[in-house]
Image: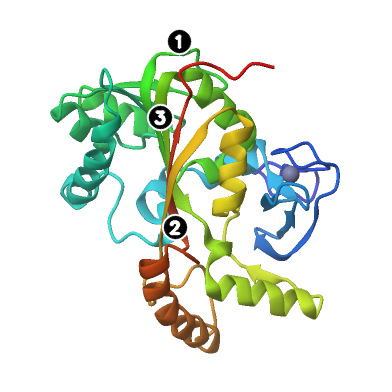
Amino acid sequence: MSATPAGATAPQTRSLGICLACGCKCPKPLAMRYEWNGLSFPAFECPACGMRGLRVQPVGETLARMYSAEYFQTDFRCGRSDTVSSDEAAFRPENDGLLARFEPYRGQGRLLEVGSAYGLLLKHATERGWQATGLELSHDAVMHARGLGLTVHEGTLESVAIPEGSFDIVYMGDVLEHVPDCHDAAARVAALLAPGGHFIVRGPITTHSLARRLGLALYGAVGRDIVLREPPYHLWEFTPASLTRLMRAVGLEVLAIEESKIPPGRPHGKKSAAQQWVMGAIDAVNVPITRMWNAFGDRALLIARKPLRAARG
Ligand SMILES: [Zn+2]
């Protein structure tokens, strides 16, 4: 503790001995790690269920520090966005597109957004007649959303008591990969859905892209790690297959997974000019492949449904 500067707290991390997605005690190293604040966060892959994530995860104060108000200004979506979270005009077209996707699953129009940030999707949903509710961890973001007249619970799926079976859609956008226990979060969402309700998840599947697959294979072959020098925001590195297994494990049926690929020119984290050039060239090939075959994307939209009757046995 004496090495910690005055006013700061000691870094807090935890090491996972098991895969939280399936309980397997056999996670094996994956050839990548984050380096941040003098700490190392190595990744794992579960041979049983294919889940990838961080073997060492930030918790407590270390996790909280990653999500200060600054996160919503500069770092949300991992620095890929040109706008701040509260810029309504910038998010209107994207939210309109998303809400159009929700429409076939409207039911009674009861929508919960987990990780509702500044509440813009909730606001745009309310304008379209949805009964929209938010759940958000950041106090600043909750206050902003409530200032727009929206209903937002402050806390997490774990800490806030929300009546089970009470939503037609639960949406998580760029959130599930950030939660400490993805299986627990998905199970809680499944419980919140009304029978026949839908869980819609959108977010990164970065290690599924061509460039990252190639990088993992090459680095793994020579016993080295891809090093990402940025905060370890993504505790989970989903793939379409592991995400599908996760949904099935909590009793949901997967209806669709739509992959997309971020065009070259927005490299993730700090990279050398040579790394950026190689990744740009691979990404240029990757974009049309993903568009044509719904494969090798680095982002996914998944739609899963809660069965009308729970499976017996
Ligand atoms: Zn597993």
Residue 73 relative to residue 94: left or right: right
Q: Counting other residues with Cα less than 10 Å from the Cα at mark 3, is it few (<14), some (14-19), or many (20 or more)?
A: many
The residue sitting at 69% across, 39% down in the picture is 21
Residue 296 in the image: state x and y as whole percent: 50, 67
Give the vertical position of 200 relative to 197 (above or below).
Answer: below
The residue sitting at 50% across, 80% down in the picture is 279
- Which quarter of the rendered picture does the N terminus lie within? top right
Q: Secondary structure at mark 3?
A: strand
Which amino acid does the dot numbered 1 rest on? Answer: Pro
Residue 311 in the image: state x and y as whole percent: 60, 20
Q: Which residue is mark 2?
A: 299
Residue placed furthest toward the top: 163
Quarter, ligand 1: top right
**Colouring:** rainbow
Q: Counting other residues with Cα less than 10 Å from the Cα at mark 1, is it few (<14), some (14-19), or many (20 or more)?
A: few
Asked whether 175 or 288 is in front, the reply is 288
Q: Secondary structure at mark 2?
A: strand
Asked if labels 1 and 3 touch by Cβ distance under 8 angstroms, the answer is no
Asked if labels 1 and 2 touch by Cβ distance under 8 angstroms, the answer is no
Residue 218 relative to residue 133: left or right: right
Which amino acid does the dot numbered 2 rest on? Answer: Arg
Q: Quadrant of residue 19?
A: top right
Q: Which of pointers 3 and 2 indicates the residue nearer the eye?
A: 3
Query: Along the polypeptide, which appears first: circle 3 or circle 2?
Result: 3
Q: Quadrant of residue 150?
A: top left
Q: CA distance from mark 3 to mark 1?
A: 16 Å
Q: Which residue is mark 1?
A: 163
Q: Which residue is mark 3?
A: 198
